[in-house]
Image: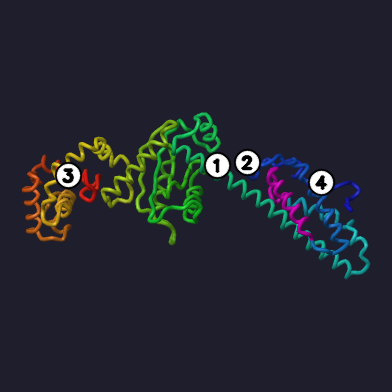
Amino acid sequence: MTVTNEHGPPELPGLSEPSGAPGPPTVPGSTAAPGPVDVAAELTLRCLDLLADVSRTGRLLRRAELESLRSLGERGAEAGHGLRDLVTHCLGATRQAWQTLPGLASAVTAAELRRTGDAVLAATEAALGALGEGHERAQRLAMRLEESNRREFIDDLLRGRGDLGVLAERAERFGVRLAAGYTVAVAVGSHPYVDGRTGICRILRDLCGRFDERTVLIVVREGRLVCIAPDGEQEVLKAFIDLTLRPAPGHTTAVRVATGRRHSGTGGVVRSYEEALSTLEYAERLGLPAKRLRAEELLVFPVLMRDRAAMADLVRNVLGPLTAARGGARPLLETITVQAEAGYVNAETARRLGVSVRTLGYRLERIRTLTGYDPSDALHRYTLETAVMGARLLEWPARPL
């Protein structure tokens, strides 16, 4: 039996039409649900029907009844209603119908009135809990779908795949202008990054708190953390690099962060991303100590490796004879590298190598004798340094040429 007042179901402001303020995100792909008026009217009738029966019997709400209220909460979220509006509506309906509830109207003693009132309030509490649970469930689903679409869009940007027209429509939805310039930063951690971990959520939360959310594009790709920043938002990249290199205790620390060059157009993101990956690869092969790297700083290496066969030939002819030295080529290759880093100051070179100046002199003499190149000669020095860089890129002598 459904109990209503003489004027019909109570109408509360704010639920006949969605408010002008932005409401919760609509669940993408959901089936067509009744409009806001239907949800409000059904919620009113459902609440009054349940409370009338509870006031007569004093029973608890059944599982099926709670599930129907969860469904109403979901539909309310999909219709654009906030949880506060739904709760206010439910409580308002209860208050207006309180005096007409059968159990309360027929109560004779104060004890009966207290028992009935307690049962109705307990049912109201359970109903509101179920309503809120359904509303939150719809919100979580909408957020997961939105985040999934966002990740898929960023992944397509980094791959450079997909129909350009569709990609442009999706870009507009996420506030991305494909014609603008973009720069990509890639972080490599001490452990692979995993999507959804608290460390990544913290980085995203911190960046969204400091910058416009539409300018923060972050995704985990192949165990690396990727950030895309548009023109005029280079501070996003700086903040991203700081947060990855100095994370909160217990979270993955970035070993290196590389930044590609700025590129524009539909393929700009892909080019910048590939440059950042190449920079990380060169830094790994060369054993560079720097944690922050820019593609501009390592442009010489793609040039050197453009003709891999020519580089292998240079390494073989210039450094190949060093394999005849006692102890192999590795100590002499290290000597050439460290001497260049020390500015060809023998005392500093010896200190960095942890050997005496006399031992350093012996090594330099062996290099001159075996290769025919003198490190004290400017042209010979450049040839030796280039060959050593090529050897490190080609992982020689560990890997045959």
Pair 3/4: label in front: 3
Residue at the far top in the pictured view: 165
Using a 10 Å C-alpha cutoff, classify the residue at mark 4 as few (fewer than 14 neighbours), some (14 to 19) or many (20 or more): some
Query: Regarding mark 4 in the picture, which secondary structure is present there?
Result: loop
Percent of width and height locating residue 366: 7, 51
83 in magenta: yes
The span from disc 1 to disc 2 (Cα, nearest Å) is: 10 Å
In the rendered structure, are the residues bearing label 3 and label 4 in contact, judged by CB atoms less than 8 Å apart? no
The residue lying toward the viewer, choosing from 310 and 270, is 310
The residue lying toward the viewer, choosing from 371 and 213, is 371
For the record, the magenta segment spans 61-85
Q: Amino acid at mark 2?
A: Pro
Residue identifier under label 2: 28
Q: Amino acid at mark 3?
A: Glu
Residue identifier under label 4: 11
The span from disc 3 to disc 4 (Cα, nearest Å) is: 83 Å
Percent of width and height locating residue 49: 84, 53
Residue 180 located left or right of residue 122: left
Query: Regarding mark 2 in the picture, which secondary structure is present there?
Result: loop
**Residue 305 picture quarter:** top left
At 39% from the left edge and 40% from the top edge, which residue is drawn?
Answer: 273
Pair 1/4: label in front: 1
The residue lying toward the viewer, choosing from 205 and 381, is 381
Image disc number at residue 149: 1
In the rendered structure, are the residues bearing label 3 and label 1 in contact, judged by CB atoms less than 8 Å apart? no
Q: How is the image coloured?
A: rainbow
Using a 10 Å C-alpha cutoff, classify the residue at mark 1 as few (fewer than 14 neighbours), some (14 to 19) or many (20 or more): some
Q: Earlier in the sequence, mark 2 or mark 4?
A: 4
Residue identifier under label 3: 385
Q: Earlier in the sequence, mark 3 or mark 2?
A: 2
Q: Earlier in the sequence, mark 1 or mark 2?
A: 2
